[in-house]
Amino acid sequence: MEYISIIIAGVGVAVSMYYSNKNLKTSIVEQERQRQADMFERQELAISKAEKETERHTQIMERLGVLMERTETNNHAISELKTEVKKLSETQVANVRDVKTAFNRIEKIENQLGALHREHRERCGKC
């Protein structure tokens, strides 16, 4: 009888080890599947984030390109404006010179008219 109980206990241990090993393998396979699913989800999240960042960077680059074009246009316009201001300044200097010359001529004419007027009065005074 003792042998029967030892055999039954041995068979029980063997069956227990078999099911325990089977459950362990199933658990390991399930954990591996879960790990792969988590890794796939993290990869998808990383790819999605990278795509959003790429789109954002593309938009930023486009805006920077527009800003560069506008800056170049503004620089050209400012350069043209400086040229025009320089021309106006030169014209103003020339106009001031011409006005001074005109005033000098007018003053000479006034002096000549004054002299002619004095001379005329002197002549008319003798008449």
Image (cartoon, rainbow, N blue to C red):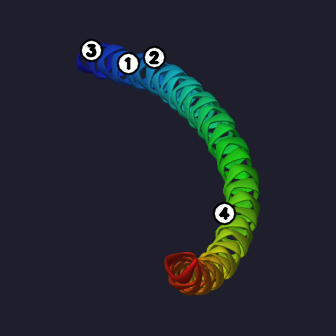
Task: Give the residue type that dot 3 points to.
Answer: Ser
Q: Quadrant of residue 101?
A: bottom right
Residue with the most extreme left position? 2
| Residue depicted at 55% across the width and 87% down the height | 115
Which residue type does callout 1 highlight? Answer: Ser
Ranked by sequence position, the earlier of labels 1 and 4 is: 1
Q: Check residue 16 in the rendering and tell me which mark sits there, or answer none.
A: 1
Residue 122: x, y in percent?
51, 84
Residue highlighted by disc 4: 78
Q: Residue 81 in the image: state x and y as whole percent.
A: 68, 62
The residue labelled by disc 2 is: 19
Report the amino acid beneath label 2.
Tyr
Query: What residue type is disc 4 on?
Result: Ile
> Spatial distance from mark 1 to mark 3, Cα to Cα?
16 Å
Classify 10 Å Cα crowding around label 2: few (below 14), some (14-19), many (20 and above).
few
Which residue is label 3 attached to?
Answer: 5
Q: Along the line of sight, which residue is nearer the eye, 37 or 106?
A: 106
Q: Earlier in the sequence, mark 1 or mark 3?
A: 3
